[in-house]
Amino acid sequence: MVAINVKNLTKKYRVKVKEKGLTGSMKSIIHPKYKEITAVDNISFSVKKGEIIAFIGPNGAGKSTTIKMLTGILYPDKGDISVLDISPTQRRKKLAYKIGTVFGQKEQLWTHLTPYDNFKFFGAIYDIADSDVEKQIEKLTAIFELDDFINTPVRNLSLGQRIRCEIVASLIHEPEILFLDEPTIGLDPVVKENIRTLIKQMNKEYGTTVFLTSHDVGDIEKLCKRIIIVNHGMIVMDDSMNNLKYNYLNKKIVEIKLKEAVDFSGDDGITVLKSKSNNLKLEVDTCKKSISDAMKLIDADNIIDINISNVPLENIITDIYKEGRHIN
Amino acid sequence: MLTAAKQQTKVLFLSVKYNIMREMTNHVTFLMNIIFMVLNNATFIVQWLLLFQLKSDIGGYVLSDVLILWGLAASTFGISHIFFSQAFKLPYLIMNGKLDSFLVQPKNVLLAVISSGTNTSAIGDLIYGYIIILIFRFSLYNLLIFTLVSILGSIILTAFGVIVGSLSFWIIRGDILSQNLISAVINFATYPEGIFKGVVRLTLYTVVPVGLINYLPLQIVLNFNFTSLLIIIGAAIIFVALAFLVFYRGLRRYSSGNLMISRI
């Protein structure tokens, strides 16, 4: 079952261009010049029901624009969008009953009200009967552990508590799809982990489809089984998390503490990332040189300590951003 | 259809209730805002008292007519700014991409946006309007007529605010134009209609519809005329329809934004 289907989606922005200084301002009054920026460039993808998908990319890649078109906030210039078989541009209200949104950078709760009052207000917005809202609040309060602060005004809550409330507010009408735009931005590691567990739980227990954008690799690694990477408005990669790791984990990081210095310059397949006295950090390209071959270059007696690890996912993603290559 | 309208109204009143609750968070500021607005409006009585010392008739208005005009202008402004104050901040909301949270709700976007804030001092304006009518033209009948035309005037004023505010969807810094037009309505609303002639007068019934918001309603309060009432009702319907049309057309051009914001 397909939850989201996007075909040839394009969105352009018209931006005014102004020359420097006051003269430039005067000129732009008489002869305004504009340039067109393609925020989303002919992208197509689909998401299955119950999937947790990461939609990532560097700043200005077109992530938020895409999520805003999927939720009916922005009108696309070209292309077709179908979310739960509903067109967000034509049936925005109908779609709104079936989706939930959390924008980490934008608050939708009333800060002077308590979370409880906010949830009641959201219940009214989604036309839910009072008794049903009460039940839903009770259920979500237990899952998201809001008991201690459900009657405290939102403005007095910590950021982590507030984000939990934001997510609960977006789940009050039991949406089939949850759009999360950087939900863990600015949170400490413990709270991040907590939020991730809760999102996973929602997905597992209620089959909620989750469409996530985040700059936090931890969010992506711990939540998502599929990843779509966008850059310059185009999809540069659409693959499973396992494939991503498999294809890109041909490089290993080797950190060695030696008794005596060893020179690796000129060795094909080995890159010295850091060298400080007898401590070395190497990157070994296993396509060119196996780890065992690399290790043979060092006398075993010369090694005090060694650690071999995968290249962090963050580095892999950064490389993909930089390369901007099409894989799918 | 009826259920949807009922649900929409429920949300609208909940929104206004929460807005006022927010303003009441600081009781002293809340009360001071209201009291000082009543006093602020009252100071203009002195100005008109002095002018009417020099001339007994200004533009066909006597002192009590001008004061009722003031009362009507204040109550019209008051109602629209208590219920729909964000209609007058539309350019700011559009330019800063602050419509997002309303667009993901299954309710009418325009109503949700314009009712998402209130103006405390507008309560003072509304109270001032009723003080004036109670002092200068007290009767139950006059109170009802005053209330009716104030509501109609506030609907036209709000719709006008939405129409000119929505220009920001098309015009960069459209806030300046809309602010000037709204200020023109408010400024003209407190002067006797008779002092304006020709093109200016025509403008006051079209581009800057203060004639429909205040002058014609004043005539109804002073001397009830069913035709004038029908004209105002018709104008209110046309302005509201235009407001929805322009706003929703403009919404297609909405470009959102990425500013860090909170609903405070």
Image (cartoon, coloured by chain):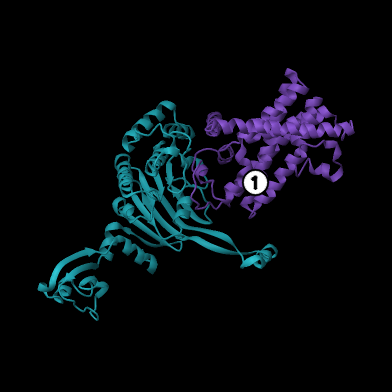
Q: Chain of mark 1?
A: B
Secondary structure state at the residue bearing disc 1: helix
- Identify the residue at image location x=76%, y=36%: B212
User: Residue A209: horizontal and vertical position, in percent?
Assistant: 36, 46
Q: Is residue B211 left or right of residue A47?
A: right
Q: Is residue B75 left or right of residue B89?
A: right
The local crowd at label 1, few if under 14, some if 14 to 19, many if 20 or more residues have their Cα within 10 Å, is: many
User: What kind of residue is marked 1?
Assistant: Gly
Q: Nearer the viewer, residue A58 or A10?
A: A58
Chain B appears what colour? purple
User: Residue B30: horizontal and vertical position, in percent?
Assistant: 58, 32
Q: Which of the 4 image quadrants contains residue A123?
A: top left
- Identify the residue at image location x=32%, y=64%: A315
Chain A appears what colour? cyan
- Tell me, yes or no, if residue A68 can be seen here: yes
Q: Is residue A302 left or right of residue A55?
A: left
**Residue marked by disc 1:** B165
Relative vertical location of residue A186 with respect to residue A137 in this rendering, above or below: below
The number of numbered discs placed on residues in the rendered structure image is 1
- Tell me, yes or no, if residue A91 can be seen here: no
- Identify the residue at image location x=85%, y=34%: B51
- Identify the residue at image location x=43%, y=40%: A98
Which residue occupies the extreme bottom position in the image?
A266
Relative vertical location of residue B133 with respect to residue A28 in this rendering, above or below: above
User: Residue B93: horizontal and vertical position, in percent?
Assistant: 57, 47
